[in-house]
Amino acid sequence: QEIMRTNDPVVASFARSLLDDAGISVVVADEHISAIEGMIGAFPRRFLVVDEDLPAARHLLVEAGLSAWLVTP
């Protein structure tokens, strides 16, 4: 399930660190194309988690102040 999108490398790094530290597996899609396209914003990084981790991941990211980047269910 897609949980968030961002073009901001700092937000992406922070979110990935939070999820990794919580033991939540995350796949970051479009990470390489986002870097190649020169940060014009055409290809945001998409964060994907498994269904059973979605509620915990969403809660963690909201608590960390990243709700602006969350994808609405």
Image (tube, rainbow, N blue to C red):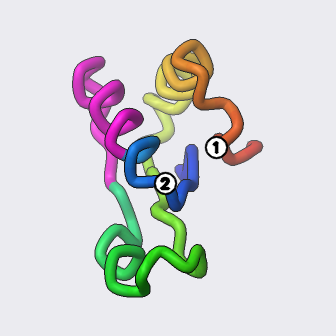
Q: Residue at x 57, y 13 (%)?
A: 63
Q: Is residue 18 magenta?
A: yes
Q: Amino acid at mark 2?
A: Asp
Residue stretch in magenta: 13-27
Contact flag, marks 1 and 2 (Cβ < 8 Å) = yes
Q: Position of residue 70 (x, y in %)?
A: 65, 41
The residue furthest top is 63
Task: Tell me residue 38's x, y (percent).
Answer: 42, 82
Where does the image place residue 13, in percent across and percent down from the top left?
32, 42
Q: Main secondary structure of the magenta part?
A: helix
Q: CA distance from mark 1 to mark 2?
A: 10 Å
Q: Which amino acid, by three-letter code, is at mark 1?
A: Trp
Residue drawn where x is 68% and y is 47% of the image:
71
Element on which disc 1 rests: helix
Q: Toward the viewer: 50 or 58? A: 58
The residue located at (41%, 75%) in the rendering is 34
Left or right: 15, with 64 as reference point:
left
In percent of width and height, residue 69 lies at 64, 43
In the depicted structure, whether residue 11 falls above or below residue 34: above
Determine whether, in the image, residue 56 is placed left or right of residue 68: left
Determine the image quadrant of residue 11: top left
Upstream in sequence: badge 1 or badge 2: 2
- Up/down of 14 relative to 69, above or below: above
Front position in the image: 23 or 17: 17
Q: Residue at x 39, y 53 (%)?
A: 9
Q: Nearer the viewer, mark 1 or mark 2?
A: 2
Which residue bears the numbered disc 2?
Answer: 8
Determine which residue is flagged by label 1. 69
Judge from the rendering whether residue 70 lies leftward or rightward of residue 17; answer left or right.
right
Mark 2 neighbour class, 10 Å CA radius: few under 14, some 14 to 19, many 20 or more: some
